Each structure stands twice: as C-alpha cells, then as structure tokens.
C-alpha cells in the first residue's frame, strides 16, 4: 500500500493552495498511453481586487507517466482556492504548472472556463507542451458561454 496524506483519513480543507499537499501514487498502467480527466464544474476563487467570488468550470486532462494524482488530494487542493485571491490567468496556469512540476506527466492541459465578471466570461487554457502522438484528445465538453448550460 502506498502511503498518502489524505486517502482513507479525515482531512481539513487546506488554508491556501501553497499549504495543500498533493499525493501521487504509482501509475498502475505505466507504459500505456491514456488520458485522465478531472472536471471541477463548481470551482471558486476570489477576485484579487474586490475579494468577490469568481466561479469556473475547470477541466484537467493529463497523460500519466510514472505517477497519477490521487483524487482526494486534488479535490482538497482545488477547494483551497475558495479563499485564495488570484486573477483567472494566474489561478488556471498555476494549477497546471504545479501539477506538471510535481507529477511530471507525459502531458497535461487545463481549461479554465470562467463565468462572467463585469459581463465578460474569461476562458484560460494552458498545456505543458505538444500532446504525445497517438493520444486521444476529446473535446473538453464545456460550451462557449451561454450560461454555461
């Protein structure tokens, strides 16, 4: 059994993204080329100017290499943004960069589909580099803004 910080234990929501501990476990299908998707349709953070909540539908896609991210630790990490002030670009890119830096997947992308602020939705996309040849990349499935319905 792999030792994890959160799985099977009671864990409080981290006070900040920097305080969040992400757990990684060995990839049970290392060597296979496949895509993992996490969707967080009710993601929230705070505007760094007004302190008002911002809402997004985040989609995280990655092709694992040696490790996979443990989903409970990812959920707690994403939840830690509820009290974090950051512009949409900083939040979206920062999530992708942290996961890529720590997990070292073959490839990773984050789509941040932010709900309107000041009447304008802001969508932010980041990826670690070109997708590996042969990797199936489905559409992220989030409609252009029309109430995001």
Image (cartoon, rainbow, N blue to C red):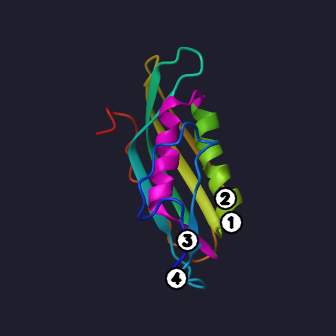
**Which is more N-terminal, label 3 or label 2?**
3
Real-space CA distance between mark 2 and mark 3, rounded to the nearest whole angstrom: 21 Å
Number of numbered discs present?
4
Q: CA distance from mark 3 to mark 1?
A: 19 Å
Cβ–Cβ under 8 Å for marks 2 and 1: yes
Judged from the image, the secondary structure of the residue bearing numbered disc 1 is: loop
Residue located 56% across and 79% down the image:
33
> Which residue appears farthest toward the front when viewing the image?
10
Earlier residue among tags 4 and 1: 4
Residue 147 spot, x, y in % from top left: 31, 32
**Quick check: can you spot residue 64?**
no
Q: Which residues are magenta?
A: 66-87
Tell me the distance, in whole angstroms, between the alpha carbons under discs 4 and 3.
Answer: 15 Å
Left or right placement of residue 108 versus residue 52 in this view: right
Task: Compare residues 51 and 25 and report the one nearer the observer.
Answer: 25
| Residue neighbourhood size for the residue with mark 1, other residues' Cα within 10 Å, grouped as few (<14), some (14–19), many (≥20) | some
Q: Which residue is mark 2?
A: 100
Tell me which numbered mark, 3 or 1, is placed earlier along the sequence: 3
**Disc number at residue 3?**
3
The residue tagged 4 is 28
Q: Residues within 10 Å of mark 3 (few under 14, many from 20)?
A: few
Circle on res. 104? 1
Q: What label does residue 51 carry, if any?
A: none
């Amino acid at each position: 059994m792999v030792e994890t910080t959160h799985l099977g234990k009671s864990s409080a929501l981290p006070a900040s993204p920097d305080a969040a501990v992400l757990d990684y476990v060995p990839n049970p299908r290392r060597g296979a080329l496949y895509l993992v998707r996490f969707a967080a349709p009710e993601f929230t953070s705070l505007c760094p100017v007004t302190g008002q909540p911002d809402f997004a539908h985040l989609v995280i896609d990655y092709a694992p290499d040696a490790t996979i991210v443990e989903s409970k630790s990812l959920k707690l990490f994403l939840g830690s943004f509820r009290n974090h002030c950051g512009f949409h670009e900083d939040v979206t890119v920062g999530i992708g960069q942290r996961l890529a830096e720590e997990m070292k997947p073959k490839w990773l992308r984050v789509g941040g589909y932010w709900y309107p602020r000041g009447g304008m939705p802001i969508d932010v996309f980041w990826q670690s580099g070109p997708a590996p040849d042969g990797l199936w990349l489905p559409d992220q499935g989030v409609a252009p803004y029309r109430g995001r319905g």
